[in-house]
């Protein structure tokens, strides 16, 4: 596309378009910039300057203190997120495989019931779920949160894989079956190798959902088992003592960095997950 | 399609196992979904008909908990807030999203980078977003101090602690988080519009804004529906953002139904009423979901 005709020059209206787009960029970036600036300021700096003034003294004290406060909860979130993502993705892949390639009477109904799960307001299941976790001895544990995230993540993970596998020609599976390949062989040798993009989408979606979860964390885990989102909220909304905004902002950055990093590194899959997860098939 | 092909070399036992294997694999998930979703909804429904307070009990009181909700001023504040918050959040996110998508669709340089910037808030947790905006809108140290330093003397912005304005602060933060995603949805939709239609209209002398308003955007009606669904769904479930920004305050001026439900069920020992509020939230979701799914399915049949 080197033709000059296709590249319109800088007419006034195009200048306006660029101005609006750049202004919007700034609006989206300002909160992040303010968070970063504040997190590197000293409390005196915060009091004397404003949101957008640069730190007089570049101080990492806020980060050190924030990390010391939320470190344990950060690792809780890791201990919750990693197993929950892996298990829910693996089970979702198998479910999707059955629901697309091995349909049986009632499997479509089950898929319908599952789809509704994507929309479920969790408030409608919180109490029974907390009773159950209590009975299982998993109340206030990270293991309990893993169970909850796997159960309520299944709807989405199954959906991702089912929607991908229905687009795979069934002849492929039939041919493998005629060759005597069994259920798991077909899955492992035929379908799994072509599922890498779907696995990426699913893992990133689940990672973002579970890492960012607050509702389950605050209801099912208190004290030492709470995830980083709950710890951050407690830190920021505590009313005792002097407010240390640099610590608050550093803690917020620590809580946000893992998902932000995933977004920067794998934005394509992130967006695909959002749209696939949001506009259900 | 799901006929089982006889496997010539398999023994009958293995054959039967193969036939049952798919169901066996799906069975645990089926049980978990039926119990964890549907039985639990039923259980919550039952609780909403009981006088449960700090612990569940099964003394049935009919619709008494729903009547108590009806008489509860805080529930009305939460519901009214949901209407204000939901309406503004959905409306503004749609307008901003569509506008940015249309502008970005004009062969913009560095489009990929700009898109990344618009969308990154969606990767953040609502708690992080709430924390950031709570600081940005901090009365005395946030936005108002910035504008005073920039020469707008006497400017104050205290909406975050103003009972009548606080819900708009939540709207601002929520729009900031979700509008980039709406932009991405519409941009994807715009890329699917046949360019020759636009060129033909241009030849006919139609101006670009007219073409977008009269031809392009109406053809994106399905995207509007999906975006509306997603935003409405986010609005009804909104909880984290309010908890992080205001914890429902000042007083309970920024309560939303999800915050009400959490507070009554888990802090105030009103399980019965909390369950009733959860059921009403479920009802609200169904009220937007059922017509949507209905039209989706009807649309599919026409294809």
Image (cartoon, rainbow, N blue to C red):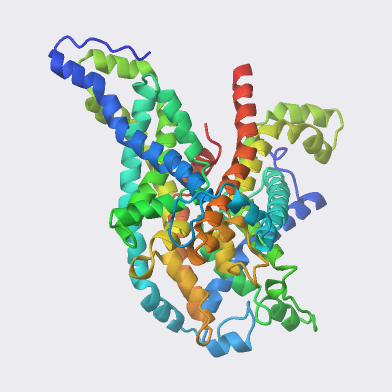
Residue nearest the viewer, comparing B206 with A266:
A266
Question: Is the C terminus of chain B in the top left, top right, bottom left or bottom right quadrant?
Answer: top right
Position in image of residue B156 (x %, y %): 76, 79
Quarter of image, res A211:
bottom left
Quarter of image, res B157:
bottom right
Position in image of residue A66 (x %, y %): 42, 77
Q: Is residue A42 above or below residue A28?
A: below
Q: Is residue B121 above or below residue B99?
A: below
Q: Residue at x 71, y 44 (%)?
A: B102
Question: Is the N terminus of chain B in the top left, top right, bottom left or bottom right quadrant?
Answer: top left
Q: Residue at x 72, y 76 (%)?
A: B158
Position in image of residue A83 (x %, y %): 30, 52
Q: Residue at x 44, y 29 (%)?
A: A111
The answer to whether any part of residue B118 appears in the image is no
Residue nearest the viewer, comparing A186 with A10:
A186
Residue nearest the viewer, comparing B128 with B229:
B229
Q: Is residue A52 above or below residue B120?
A: below
Position in image of residue A178 (x %, y %): 24, 12
Residue nearest the viewer, comparing A10 with A206:
A206
- Name the residue furthest right: B205
Left or right: A255, with A172 as reference point: right
Q: How many marks?
A: 0
Q: Is residue B219 above or below residue B248?
A: above
Quarter of image, res A193:
top left
Left or right: B207, with B86 as reference point: right
The answer to whether any part of residue A231 appears in the image is yes
């Amino acid at each position: 596309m080197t033709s000059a005709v296709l590249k319109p020059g800088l007419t006034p209206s195009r200048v306006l378009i660029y101005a609006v787009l750049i202004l919007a960029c700034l609006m989206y970036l300002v909160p992040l910039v303010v968070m970063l600036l504040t997190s590197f300021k000293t409390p005196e700096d915060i009091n004397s300057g404003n949101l957008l003034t640069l730190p007089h003294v570049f101080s990492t004290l806020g980060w050190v203190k924030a990390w010391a406060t939320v470190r344990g909860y950060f690792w809780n979130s890791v201990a919750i997120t990693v197993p929950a993502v892996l298990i829910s993705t693996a089970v979702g892949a198998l479910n999707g495989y059955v629901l697309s390639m091995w349909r049986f009477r009632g499997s479509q109904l089950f898929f319908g019931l599952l789809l509704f799960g994507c929309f479920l307001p969790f408030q409608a299941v919180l109490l029974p779920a907390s009773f159950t976790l209590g009975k299982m001895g998993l109340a206030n544990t990270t293991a309990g949160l893993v169970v909850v995230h796997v159960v309520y993540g299944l709807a989405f993970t199954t959906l991702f894989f089912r929607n991908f596998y229905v687009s795979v020609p069934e002849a492929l599976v039939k041919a493998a079956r005629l060759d005597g390949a069994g259920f798991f062989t077909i899955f492992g040798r035929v379908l799994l190798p072509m599922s890498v993009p779907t696995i990426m989408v699913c893992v990133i979606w689940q990672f973002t959902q579970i890492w960012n979860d607050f509702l389950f964390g605050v209801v099912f885990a208190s004290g030492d088992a709470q995830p980083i989102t709950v710890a951050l909220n407690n830190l920021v909304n505590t009313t005792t003592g002097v407010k240390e905004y640099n610590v608050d902002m550093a803690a917020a950055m620590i809580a946000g960095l893992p998902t932000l990093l995933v977004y920067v590194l794998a934005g394509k899959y992130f967006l695909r997950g959002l749209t696939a997860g949001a506009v259900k098939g | 399609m799901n006929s089982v092909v006889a496997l010539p070399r398999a023994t009958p036992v293995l054959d039967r196992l193969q036939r049952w294997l798919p169901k066996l694999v799906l069975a645990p998930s089926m049980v978990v979904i039926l119990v964890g979703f549907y039985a639990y909804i039923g259980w919550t429904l039952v609780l909403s008909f009981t006088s449960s307070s700090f612990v569940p009990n099964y003394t049935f009181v009919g619709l008494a908990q729903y009547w108590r909700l009806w008489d509860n001023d805080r529930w009305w504040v939460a519901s009214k807030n949901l209407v204000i918050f939901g309406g503004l959040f959905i409306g503004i996110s749609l307008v901003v999203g569509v506008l940015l998508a249309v502008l970005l669709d004009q062969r913009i340089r560095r489009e990929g980078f700009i898109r990344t910037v618009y969308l990154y808030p969606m990767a953040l947790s609502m708690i992080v977003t709430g924390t950031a905006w709570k600081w940005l809108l901090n009365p005395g140290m946030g936005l108002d101090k910035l504008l005073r330093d920039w020469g707008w003397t006497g400017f104050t912005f205290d909406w975050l602690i103003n009972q009548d304005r606080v819900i708009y602060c939540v709207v601002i933060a929520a729009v900031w988080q979700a509008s980039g995603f709406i932009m991405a949805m519409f941009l994807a939709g715009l890329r699917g519009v046949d360019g020759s239609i636009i060129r033909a209209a241009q030849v006919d002398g139609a101006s670009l804004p007219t073409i977008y308003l009269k031809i392009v955007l109406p053809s994106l009606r399905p995207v509007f529906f999906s975006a509306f669904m997603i935003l409405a769904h986010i609005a009804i479930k909104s909880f984290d953002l309010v908890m992080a920004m205001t914890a429902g305050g000042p007083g309970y001026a920024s309560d939303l139904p999800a915050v009400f439900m959490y507070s009554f069920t888990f802090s105030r020992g009103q399980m019965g009423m909390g369950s009733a509020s959860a059921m009403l939230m479920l009802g609200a979701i169904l009220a937007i979901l059922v017509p949507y799914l209905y039209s989706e399915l009807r649309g599919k049949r026409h294809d």
